[in-house]
Amino acid sequence: MARVRAVDRRLFLLIEIVARRLSREADARLRAEANVTASQSAVLFLLLRRGERRLGSIGEVLALGAPAVTGLINRMETAGLVIKRKDSSDKRGALVDLTEAGRRAAERADQVLRGFNAELDEKLGETDAAIVYDALTRLATDSDTDA
Amino acid sequence: MARVRAVDRRLFLLIEIVARRLSREADARLRAEANVTASQSAVLFLLLRRGERRLGSIGEVLALGAPAVTGLINRMETAGLVIKRKDSSDKRGALVDLTEAGRRAAERADQVLRGFNAELDEKLGETDAAIVYDALTRLATDSDTDA
DNA sequence: CGCGATTCATTCGTGTGTGAAAGACTATGC
DNA sequence: GCATAGTCTTTCACACACGAATGAATCGCG
């Protein structure tokens, strides 16, 4: 049950619903197998592949506002996943980097999400997955650069 | 700036980012032009087209857990958008329906989101929009019935 | 140099979501 | 008929997001 055709042919509402469902599932798996949340895992991946970054840079990549990043990083620091230090070249800013525990968590989380995304790709089929990925990327970037 | 290619070729993370961006934009427009939030608008549409419903039914359609629905409806009741009454045929449940103000808000919100979704469709193009809509619908329903 | 504008992060108040547990009611099986 | 199991909503504690306002540091222009 819980057919979704539901609300309307309105893309925005559908994306919200899908995002909630996927988030719930991914979050549950990540908590169980890597002991991190879905939001935290996004930060972990970013730091793992691109190294130490400022808070603002994290928010830019993940489309998060400044207060959201502050809170997220604080919780992650409490959990021992990252360390935050003052940027000595610009004392307004702070730099965030992985701890060793954070690095290990990032690698576990990577495995979990790799599996999850493989399942999604399979459900969509290769062609559709590519189109969806492209289309969403367009939606994410457009509203940005049109200013 | 704020290129999104960023995080990874991980569909799940991309959907999260897009959902956040779209939500932020839609929410701002809905607040400004219809004086409701994005979450509230989803409930308004559901009630407008399908009439009085139980809390659980709302949660099922919108993929929300029971506590989320309780909170959402309570805030909407405080705002005068809906009324809640005991279901006399099953006193565990409660029924929610639009007030007159709620109906008017739903219609204004409908205009706003109609425009917003038209913009999205345009950005995607007709073909891709249809594929994306289909693919997301599949993602939303699958994880449901596989139990 | 110095003062105003800008930028980066934080705090505040609020809305929205979660899972777990409790409470109220209904349904079922003996 | 009555205990037990199931269903529906609420409450609780928490995570996560937002906009607006604040504080701290830097930039940039005169």
Image (tube, coloured by chain):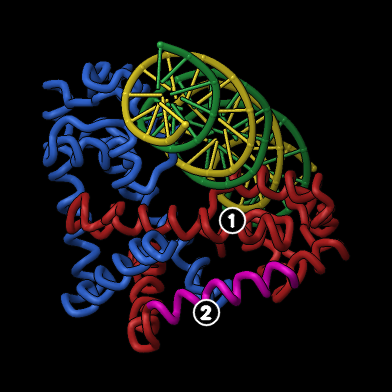
Chain colours: A red, B blue, C yellow, D green
Query: Residue A99 got which mark?
Result: none
Up-down relation of residue A119 to residue A7 (above or below): below
Left of A23 or right of it: where is A91? right
Up-down relation of residue B22 to residue B142 (above or below): above
Task: Between residue B32 and residue A114, name the one nearer to us.
Answer: A114
Q: Which residues are magenta?
A: A107-123
Circle 1 crowding by C-alpha within 10 Å: few under 14, some 14–19, many from 20: many
Name the residue rendered at 27%, 42% in the picture. B42
User: Which residue occupies the extreme bottom position in the image?
Assistant: A127
Query: Residue A27 got which mark?
Result: 1
SS at badge 2: helix
Find out whether residue A117 is within the magenta segment.
yes
Find out whether residue B87 is within the magenta segment.
no
Which residue matches tag 2? A118
Name the residue rendered at 36%, 53% in the picture. A16
- Measured as percent of width and height from the top left, residue B103 is found at 12, 29
